Image (cartoon, rainbow, N blue to C red):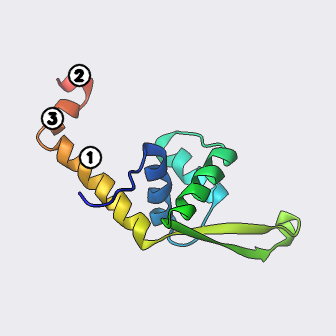
Amino acid sequence: MGTSKRLGEFEQLLLFALLHLEGEAHGTGIRRLILHRTGREISPGALYTAMDRLEGQGMVSSYLGEATPPRGGRRRRHYRIEPEGRRALHEAWETVRSMAEGVERELGPEEAR
């Protein structure tokens, strides 16, 4: 399995969120999606720190949108996943799938075992 950049669970959640949000990803939207899909609350500080790290590794890129009156004239930072991020996420997904292969039934609901 090729890439030397290993992703942690949190980084994987962020990259999956970017895929779901298709180029319209900003901090609030990413946090809402992760909360909705996982029940996990993400602090803004944790999100932006991780996104900066992923951007430094070439896995995501960002740009500043236009200033808007509802945001008090502030600009919103938007994120998108880059090919390196897609590769790393695919590799992480394949690693989990490979390890889980053959034990899916053991991972079923507790009452089913």
Q: Where residue 36 sits in the image (x, y, percent)?
A: 53, 47
| 4, above or below 38, in the image | below
Label 1: which residue?
Answer: 96
Tell me which amino acid carries mark 3. Arg
Q: Are marks 2 and 3 in contact (CB under 8 Å)?
A: no
Q: Where residue 10 sits in the image (x, y, percent)?
A: 48, 45
Q: Where residue 50 sits in the image (x, y, percent)?
A: 58, 51
Identify which residue is drawn at 43% across, 64% down. Answer: 85
Q: Residue extending furthest left?
A: 102
Q: Where residue 5 sits in the image (x, y, percent)?
A: 39, 56
What secondary structure is marked by label 1? helix
Label 2: which residue?
Answer: 111
Q: Residue extending furthest front?
A: 4
Identify the mark nearer the N-term, 2 or 3: 3
What secondary structure is marked by label 2? helix
Is disc 1 surrounded by few (<14), some (14 to 19) or many (20+) residues within 10 Å? Answer: few
Label 3: which residue?
Answer: 105
Q: CA distance from mark 2 to mark 3?
A: 12 Å
Which of discs 3 and 1 lies nearer the camera? The answer is 1
Is disc 3 surrounded by few (<14), some (14 to 19) or many (20+) residues within 10 Å? Answer: few
Identify which residue is drawn at 41% across, 72% down. Answer: 83
Q: Quadrant of the N terminus?
A: bottom left
Tell me which amino acid carries mark 2. Glu
Q: Is residue 6 left or right of residue 80?
A: left
Identify the mark nearer the N-term, 1 or 2: 1
Where, by quadrant of the figure, is residue 24 drawn? Answer: bottom right
Q: Quadrant of the C terminus?
A: top left
